[in-house]
Amino acid sequence: GAVELGPYRHYMQKEIFEQPRAIADTLEGISAITPDIFGDQAFKIFKQIDSVLILACGTSYYSGLTAKYWIEAIAGVRCDVEIASEYRYRDSVPNPHALVVTISQSGETADTLAALRHAQSQGMQHTLTICNSATSAMVRECALAYITRAGVEVGVASTKAFSTQLAALFLLTLTLAQVKDRLSDKDEAAYLKQMRHLPVAITAVLALEPQIIAWAEAFARKENALFLGRGLHYPIALEGALKLKEISYIHAEAYPAGELKHGPLALVTEEMPVVTVAPNDSMIEKLKSNMQEVRARGGELYVFADGDSRITSGEGLHVIRLPEHYGALSPILHVVPLQLLAYHTALARGTDVDKPRNLAKSVTVE
Ligand code: G6P
């Protein structure tokens, strides 16, 4: 039946606020890391694979890019991520020992399905999908599956599907780490504890909405925006820019902050808001010098920092603080204010938030 809007103005807003519940449901029943959560054959398959190849489109592609940082750093397994519409037509070098991972909210995206079938036709039989629809073609055609429990997502701009994909991909990372003997019992317990705490941590981030609404007023008057991030949060910057362009029609692009000097710095003027995803991680000092490069050209910085980072507001520098730094799982928190920023900017511009022009929820034809 129809999904009720309740107190929300749009499905997108409702779905952003459902994320604590969606993540809790996605992680329900996981009390220990074991390959079985991905299917009966998972242990056997994970033992044989030497690398991961992620195939996806759109927002799902960005969750895959985030997972690459986790899988290589924590599991020590090589990971490539490809846009499905490119991979399916590219002459690539097949690796029968790779684990092919498709990521899809709908499980019906034509390009992602075709990319999966292309990999299979090249002799790659170890397949896994992270999918929000248990009855989809993707689940039927992959050997292994993890079903996210975001629930029905109505808004064309994906939100809760993305954060639940990240939660599932983090579970995959820990499982691969365990199979490769890289996960100590102590680390397993600590990561699981942090994962269980995610719904509470996201709820605290959602409480920042009033501050983000104030920023959205300024964004609504712009026609361009730049998003910066580094490391694990570069894909989060990409996702933030995608959300803004999809629903507010503001031209937005994301760059890994270290690349600023190789082009986008030429775009920076007082007219250019620069959103910076700045968690208090190992890249923070590098990121701060990138922020100075922007300030020196008059660019206006909008920074999402953590409570424990030493970045203070000043002229041309606006700061919203998330609670304390959340370590490896920080991307799951830092995407939330970017979703809210896109939502409230679109609201201020009066666009059709849940049904942006020219876009479809699920692209089942090429
Ligand atoms: C469309 C949707 C996006 C989604 C993408 C991939 O472009 O508008 O929100 O990220 O398809 O969809 P999938 O269902 O495969 O995740």
Image (cartoon, grey):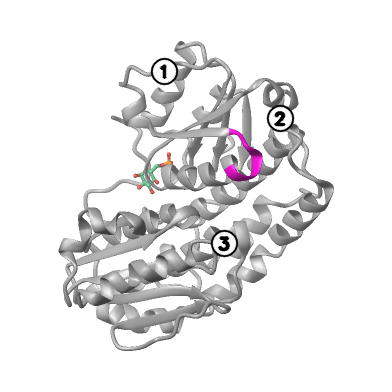
Q: Is residue 1 visible?
A: no
Give the amino acid type for the residue marked by disc 1 in the picture: His
Return the residue at label 1: 118
The answer to which of 55 and 69 lies nearer the viewer is 69
Residue 33 located left or right of residue 315: right
Q: Which residues are magenta?
A: 73-77
The residue at which mark 2 appears reads as 39
Give the residue number, with chain letter if any, for mark 3.
Answer: 330
Question: Residue 39: image x %, image y %?
Answer: 71, 30
Ranked by sequence position, the earlier of labels 1 and 2 is 2
In which quarter of the view is residue 175 placed?
top right
Q: What amino acid is at disc 3?
A: Ser
* Residue at x 30%, y 21% (from the top left corner): 89
Picture residue at 31% right of the left edge, 30% below the top: 365
- Residue at point 47% right, 62% down? 335
**In the image shown, does 164 or 175 lie closer to the viewer?**
175
Q: Disc 2 on helix, strand or loop?
A: loop
| Dot 1: element | helix
Residue type highlighted by circle 2 = Gly
